[in-house]
Image (cartoon, rainbow, N blue to C red):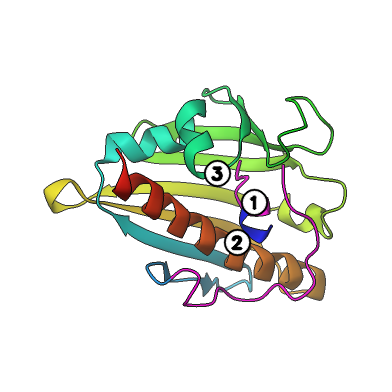
Amino acid sequence: MRRRLTTLVLSLGLGVGLAGAAAAEPAKAPDVTDTSFVMADGQRTLQQSVVIDAPVATLWKAFVDPAQFRRWNAPVVAIDLRVGGMLEATYDQAKAIGDPDNIKNRIITYLPERLLVFQNVQAPRALPNADRFQRTVTVVQYEPLAAGRTRVTISCTGFAADPASTQIYDFFQSGDAELLEKMKQVFETTP
């Protein structure tokens, strides 16, 4: 369930229930590197990456093409890829686009095959501290490496240090890592 809530990103429809959410366990996301940090003003950035044996073009489509997004993330998704457009998704196959419990992310900007920036504008009503998450901005970066490999980095900037923000930060720290691991598994095994 944590994996589902995370990205939606789209970052990421979802699971509910944050009890016990904690930092990603290495066994659940062994290939994910966590380089999270704290800014001088105390704001925290959750930053995780994974190297995937797939070209940038393939992994870009994983986030912006609904058919590819369904392969590794949520089964119900609509993507309006434009500045001001929306990425809407749910992990509940019984729900449709437009449901008030879907995850909706407003696309702030993008650079094809390099960068996708969005901000959550609607979270499931049962998600505790969703307002804290909506104060953050998510950045997905693609770095081409040798031999058709790509580093995908998800950074979520603007987390405060209060207890409610810490709870949602911990939830996404675990969930985003699991999501990146799943992306790696799906796109390395089948193009």
Question: What is the spatial separation of the Cα atoms under label 3 and label 1, in whole angstroms?
Answer: 7 Å
Q: Which mark is residue 73?
A: 3
Residue type indicated by callout 2: Gly
Residue type indicated by callout 3: Asn
Q: Give yes or no for residue 12 being in the magenta stretch.
A: yes
In this view, 175 is above or below 55: below
Q: Give yes or no for residue 22 being in the magenta stretch.
A: yes
- Label whose residue precedes the other's in the sequence (3 or 2): 3
Which is closer to the viewer, label 3 or label 2?
3
In this view, 66 is above or below 38: above
Query: Would you say the residues marked 2 and 1 are in contact, meaning their CB atoms lie under 8 Å apart?
Result: yes
Mark 3 neighbour class, 10 Å CA radius: few under 14, some 14 to 19, many 20 or more = many
Say whether residue 146 is left or right of residue 66. Answer: left
- Label whose residue precedes the other's in the sequence (2 or 1): 1
Q: Which mark is residue 175?
A: 2
> On the image, which quarter does residue 114 sit in?
top left
What is the span of residues highlighted in magenta in the rendered image? 4-29
Q: Position of residue 119 (x, y in %)?
A: 64, 42
Q: Which mark is residue 4?
A: 1
Q: Secondary structure at mark 1?
A: helix
Q: Quadrant of the N terminus?
A: bottom right
Query: Would you say the residues marked 3 and 2 are in contact, meaning their CB atoms lie under 8 Å apart?
Result: no
> On the image, which quarter does residue 11 sit in?
top right
Q: Quadrant of the C terminus?
A: top left
Which residue: 39% across, 32% down?
Answer: 61
Question: What is the spatial separation of the Cα atoms under label 2 and label 1, in whole angstroms?
Answer: 7 Å
Residue 65 visible here = no
Query: Which is more toward the observer, 71 or 46?
Result: 71
Which residue: 50% across, 33% down?
Answer: 109
Say whether residue 186 is left or right of residue 18. Answer: left
